[in-house]
Amino acid sequence: MDVPKVAKSLPGVESVSKIDDTTYEGALTVRVGPIKLALQGKIILEEQNKSAWRAVLRAEAKDRMAAGAVNGKTLMNLKEISAGMTELLVETDVNILGKIGEFGQPIIRKKADAMLKEFVENIKKQLTGK
Amino acid sequence: MIPFEYRTPKNLKEVHATLKEFGTDAKLIAGGTALVIMMKQRLVRPSCLVSLRSVRGLNGIEVKDGGLSIGGLATHRAVESSSLVRRRLPMLAETYHHVATLRVRNMATVGGGLAHADPNQDPPPSLIALGASVKATSSTGSRMISLDEFFKDYYETVLNPDEIVTEVMVPKQAPNTGAAYIKFLPRTADDYATVSAAAVLTLDKSMKTIADVRIALGSVGVTPIRATEAEAVLRGQPLKTEAFAEAGEKAKQAVDPVSDFRGSAAYKTDMAAVFVRRALEKALADIRQQAKAKAAPKPAKKKAVKKGKKR
């Protein structure tokens, strides 16, 4: 699995570099009106099962100015429905900690939904080559 | 707190010059009731604060083209206690009266509040329902923006970084118009609303047909929301109170709340229908009260004046 490519499908991801086979480092910028979060952290490939077309990614990121942190887990699964059809299942569980969590729950949740949607769209584009 | 520059320009020209100097890292500060909290939380870290406090001539409230012109730097308290607003648009004075606490209202400005664009605020639904627009001034000139189109997203407006809200213009309301703003506060009086609704209702001469109606909601989406489809249910129709409930149901389609400690999304959606209906009922009661005050015989003049104020 090309982790940097997958990670960059998430809007706002700036750079992803490899540390070792299962660990990557990256930066993510999220903007909500005047609020700008610059998150820096790690992406860990927890599980990769090519035969089942399943991958689990865990991300841990912190805002540089210590306003908060984001921990998330993403499961991606490809399922063949028919010869010309494949289902992509993306499941995400994100915890937002610290000030940003306390203050911006509703904002972040709406934003996260929008980001995830775009992420899935981007992955879809990559897979179908369109 | 993180160190930052603090500038106190004396006029708009100096404000624009300072904004240019610091670029997008600079933030305008008026009352500071929203920005300072965000800065304390380190969510916003401007390199420079450009205070508007020394800028004069932007806090007036006056009659303009039959409507009301409110300066961008007028405080919430000034609007709430202005005899002009209370006489001409009592609903607006009442709306500002319901914002947070007195301490906040003493500091928060009308323009600053709108530019902050928090969908939970009280004034936006009322101002949208009243058909208000804002005047945005930049170094190259100014433009009028209808409040309908002003809010873009959570904390985001269509304002450019160098634009300042210098005036809010509320147009003259048609005859036989009633207005109401209500908010659902299950917790404390100074809390953000769970759902809020504003309605401005205009009847025709016969007082039996709805000539026009504007409905706006707060706290149920990423921006204040105008419920145009709910309005369409009523506009041009004969006046029937059952139709208000129907409009409320229609308003549900316009909202998109999030679940939080103030209620689940489903509950808030249901409450949006209830509060739209109640706002419409209150607006109708407002029209009837005005008509009654007008029709009151001369000897009751004292009473009529009082009612006129309440209008």
Image (cartoon, coloured by chain):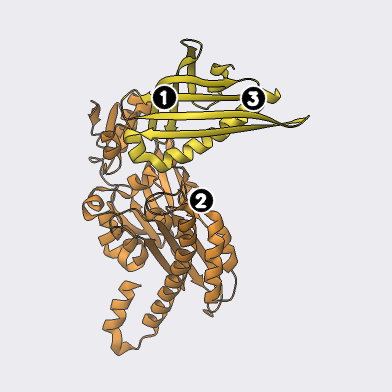
Picture residue at 52% right of the left edge, 27% below the top:
A11
Separation of residues labelled 3 and 2 (CA atoms): 37 Å
Colour in which chain B is drawn: orange
Q: B139 or A63, which is in the foreground?
A: A63
Is the N terminus of chain B in the top left, top right, bottom left or bottom right quadrant? top left
Mark 2 neighbour class, 10 Å CA radius: few under 14, some 14 to 19, many 20 or more: some
User: To which residue does mark 3 refer?
Assistant: A52
**Chain given the colour yellow:** A
Residue type at the position of mark 1:
Glu
User: To which residue does mark 1 refer?
Assistant: A60
Indicate which label's residue lies in the foreground, 1 or 3: 3
Which image quadrant for residue B12?
Answer: top left
User: To which residue does mark 2 refer?
Assistant: B256
Is the C terminus of chain B in the top left, top right, bottom left or bottom right quadrant? bottom left
Asked if residue B54 can be seen in this view, the reply is yes
Asked if residue B89 can be seen in this view, the reply is no
Q: A109 or B103, which is in the foreground?
A: A109
Q: For this view, does B285 lie left or right of residue B303?
A: right
Q: Chain of mark 3?
A: A
Indicate which label's residue lies in the foreground, 1 or 2: 1
Residue type at the position of mark 3:
Ala
Q: A36 or A57, which is in the foreground?
A: A57
